[in-house]
Image (spheres, rainbow, N blue to C red):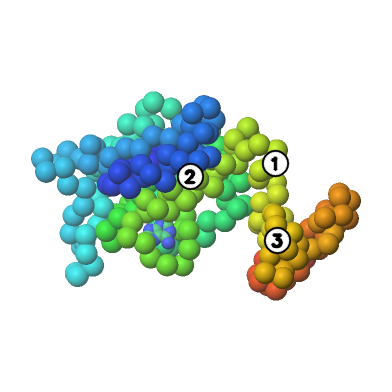
């Protein structure tokens, strides 16, 4: 899978996408991630990418020209399955969305900034608008990093069997069960007896039960989805 990220702050993406599983996925050739500086596509002599809003007092808006140039120049090289815009008013990103994106071949993620992008970019060029939560970030870079990280770890071969994404929280609308390591007793708190039993079937049943109970208690909204009460 190839992910092209368009941003005014490429440096912000250096760190989050160069460690751990994402780094390994790139090294092993499962994922290609390219970060593009939007300013490189500006025809303005000062490399400006924003302009004043037509609505008074609404702050600066990212202009059509550099974004269109950036997207069109990428599209000339290959076909893209999705052109995503990260924005707080987008659809809430979740594990289901990550699963869908992990099946794509080439995607572009455009990071929002300032007071947003010219609506005509959204109308004409963007195929998916995603928010990572109901709060406002300084820009879309962290959102792009979150989306990329969660998608890349789902690509076949990236995770080992042991860390398989199938057992992640949210995959069945269930949170993960609690986990323990040594020591078996810590400050008087014992690891649940069943985990020391060596009986895989009983342990699996217990883990499932714990996942269901945790979800019911901590995330009643998710629990409803799990039981099929809502979509
Ligand atoms: N840009 C600013 N805030 C954002 C959010 N919550 N999700 C995605 N992009 C954003």
Please provide percent x and percent y for residue 86: 41, 53
Beta carbon of the mark 2 residue lies under 8 A of ligand 1: no
The residue lying toward the viewer, choosing from 90 and 199, is 199
Residue labelled with disc 1: 162
Helix, strand or loop under label 2 = helix
| The furthest residue to the left | 45
In the image, which is nearer the foreground, mark 2 or mark 1?
1
Question: Which of labels 2 and 3 is toward the front?
Answer: 3
Asked which secondary structure carries label 3, the reply is loop
Which residue is denoted by mark 2 in the rendering? 148
Residue 211 seen anywhere in this rendered image of the structure: no
Viewer-proximal residue among 5 and 45: 5
Label 2–label 1 contact, CB within 8 A: no
Dot 1 alpha-carbon crowd within 10 angstroms: few under 14, some 14 to 19, many 20 or more: few
Circle 3 is placed at which residue position? 178
Spot occupied by residue 193 in the image (x, y as percentages of width and height): 83, 62
69, above or below 16, in the image: above
**What residue lies at 46% left-to-right and 41% top-to-bottom?**
19
| Mark 2–mark 3 distance (CA, rounded to whole Å) | 26 Å
């Amino acid at each position: 899978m190839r992910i092209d990220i368009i941003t005014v702050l490429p440096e912000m993406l250096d760190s989050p996408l160069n460690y751990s599983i994402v780094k390994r996925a790139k090294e092993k050739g499962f994922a290609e991630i390219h970060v593009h500086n939007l300013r490189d596509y500006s025809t303005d002599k000062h490399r400006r990418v924003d302009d004043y809003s037509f609505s008074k007092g609404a702050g600066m808006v990212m202009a059509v020209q550099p974004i269109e140039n950036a997207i069109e120049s990428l599209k000339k090289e290959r076909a893209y399955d999705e052109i995503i815009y990260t924005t707080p008013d987008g659809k809430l990103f979740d594990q289901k969305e990550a699963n869908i994106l992990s099946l794509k071949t080439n995607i572009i993620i455009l990071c929002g900034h300032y007071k947003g992008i010219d609506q005509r970019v959204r109308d004409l060029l963007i195929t998916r608008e995603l928010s990572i939560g109901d709060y406002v970030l300084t820009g879309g870079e962290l959102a792009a990093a979150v989306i990329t990280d969660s998608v890349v770890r789902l690509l076949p071969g990236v995770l080992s069997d042991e860390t398989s994404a199938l057992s992640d929280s949210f995959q069945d609308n269930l949170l993960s069960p609690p986990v323990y390591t040594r020591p078996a007793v810590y400050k008087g708190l014992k690891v649940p007896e069943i985990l020391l039993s060596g009986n895989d079937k009983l342990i699996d049943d217990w883990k499932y039960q714990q996942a269901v109970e945790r979800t019911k208690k901590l995330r009643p909204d998710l629990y409803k989805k799990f039981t099929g009460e809502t979509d």
